[in-house]
Amino acid sequence: MNILFAASEAVPLAKTGGLADVAGALPKALNKLGSDVRVILPKYEQIPDVFSSKFERIAEFTVSFGWRNQYCGLLKAEIDGTVYYLIDNEFYFKRGGLYGYGDDPERFVFFCFAVAECAQYMGFRPDIVHCHDWQTGLIPFLLKTRYAYDPLWRSVKSVFTIHNLQYQGLFGIDLMKEFTGAGDECFTADSLEFNGAASCMKGGLVYGDKLTTVSASYAREIQSPYYGEQLDGLLRYRSGDLTGIVNGIDENSFDPMNDGSLHTPYRNSLPRKRRNKLDLQAEFGLPQSQQIPVIGIVSRLVEQKGFDLIAAILNDLLQEEIQLIVLGAGDRKYEEMFQRAAREFPHKAAIWLGYSDRIARRIYAGSDMFAMPSKFEPCGLSQLIALRYRTVPIVRETGGLKDTVQPYNAFTGEGTGFTFANYNAHEFLDGVRRALAVYEKEEEWKQIVSNGAKQDYSWTSSAKAYLKLYSDMIPHRKETEPCPVIL
Ligand code: ADP
Ligand code: GLC
């Protein structure tokens, strides 16, 4: 099966969050199972030279959308066994960051058109184009409208995966009309229109042949008004086509035994893990002590991740005998909240503002506990990485957190983390205190750490679920049949 992954980020090329982890690791896992999965993304300035230098320019063409005619380069390289394509246009993508620009809608509309146009130059005929989040939402729309009779696309199916329903790519209908050349019929409630605006997310949700999201719980939750971001009605309508498939992590990349960011590799030895704690404390300027429990956070600093709960109990939390180490960037109010805490409790709290893969890995390794009290969480990879690094998660029972962290039961000794149900600051604080109480009892703590270590966080079983979804969509072709050639 030939699958083209269209995404706005993918490791190892460009990353701001978990989408990149998925778009990097899932193709690898699917390719191991015998498919040919290739990934296409924009050519950002941030792509490290070691990778960008491997790319070869295979085509140059013009992408026409609305009245715009824009240059597009298509580059190709094989990295770590996976073929990547890059869409090159410096006006749109040669910028300091990946997102957050006033013309983001135009940048990603261009990307969607460019993906559709480059099919003729790729030397690869996908059976399925698998799109991820709003940035690629217009691809399923284009395949069902403008490209519906295009010989290269007419038999291609689309899968649209929701990684986060909150980010929808909304902008003015007039602008969207201008970009797409689509008529009024495409801006009704059963098409792209959303509360008087045009929605890229709806392009995927309405026109994708199949929809998936990244955990079974989130698939259920988004069909309810609380989590549905006003799209729950549409998602209930499409529930027959919607599946939840939980994310995994790349266990080779996230392996405390083979992680170049750590001085002391470890697997099941807590004493070796705790040497990483001493390194981490030194790096963050906190007193070094193996005993004191360290709670780590690595996150985008946004409301989704539960920082309002942390704000409400931060002072109480810092009265406990703990250290709190935070790596993140995002909303100013949360950055300032942690900076203030670090100033007021210099021996207990430290924050590193920004994005750093190296520091993130050192926090996963050096912490005893990992806090993620999310308001909603489609899947969450941080808690999986934490578990892989023998760090016990404290999470709210929502979305993928509920599906991947089993609550610790002191009577049976089962469970991998500490959980709480309601979006309530004192329930979170109670979860932390339960964790601290167990941490005091070394044998019990070892038990919970080893329970977590035994879980399978790899992509193996989820990749099989995706493969089944794909093959059910193209039932007439046998696995071994060659790709049809269109003349
Ligand atoms: P989300 O995609 O919503 O941000 P996930 O838990 O799915 O949340 O994935 C977050 C990914 O991004 C993890 O790999 C995490 O380690 C990484 N990450 C988040 N913030 C930072 C940061 N400031 N520096 C380095 N890595 C980060
Ligand atoms: C999104 C979600 C996160 C998920 C990630 C990868 O960013 O917020 O929960 O793990 O996508 O699917």
Image: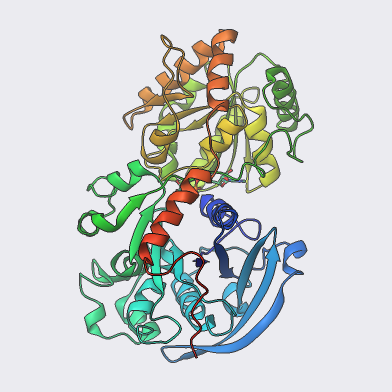
Q: Nearer the viewer, residue 80 or 437?
A: 80
Residue at 47%, 42% in the rendered image: 380
Residue 43 position by quadrant? bottom right
Q: Position of residue 130 (x, y in %)?
A: 45, 64
Q: Position of residue 98 (x, y in %)?
A: 57, 63
Q: Position of residue 67 (x, y in %)?
A: 43, 92
Total marks drawn?
0
Q: Nearer the viewer, residue 143 or 468?
A: 468
| Image position of 18 with respect to 155: above or below | above
Q: Is residue 299 left or right of residue 246?
A: right
Residue 20 visible to an observer of this rendering? yes
| Image position of 176 with respect to 334: above or below | below
Residue at 23%, 47% in the rendered image: 224
| Image position of 485 with respect to 218: above or below | below
Q: Position of residue 335 (x, y in %)?
A: 54, 42
- Residue placed farthest to the right in the image? 263
Q: Is residue 34 left or right of residue 372?
A: right
Q: Nearer the viewer, residue 163 or 406?
A: 406
Residue at 26%, 79% in the rendered image: 186
Residue 167 visible to an observer of this rendering? no
Q: How is the image coloured?
A: rainbow
Residue 270 position by quadrant? top right
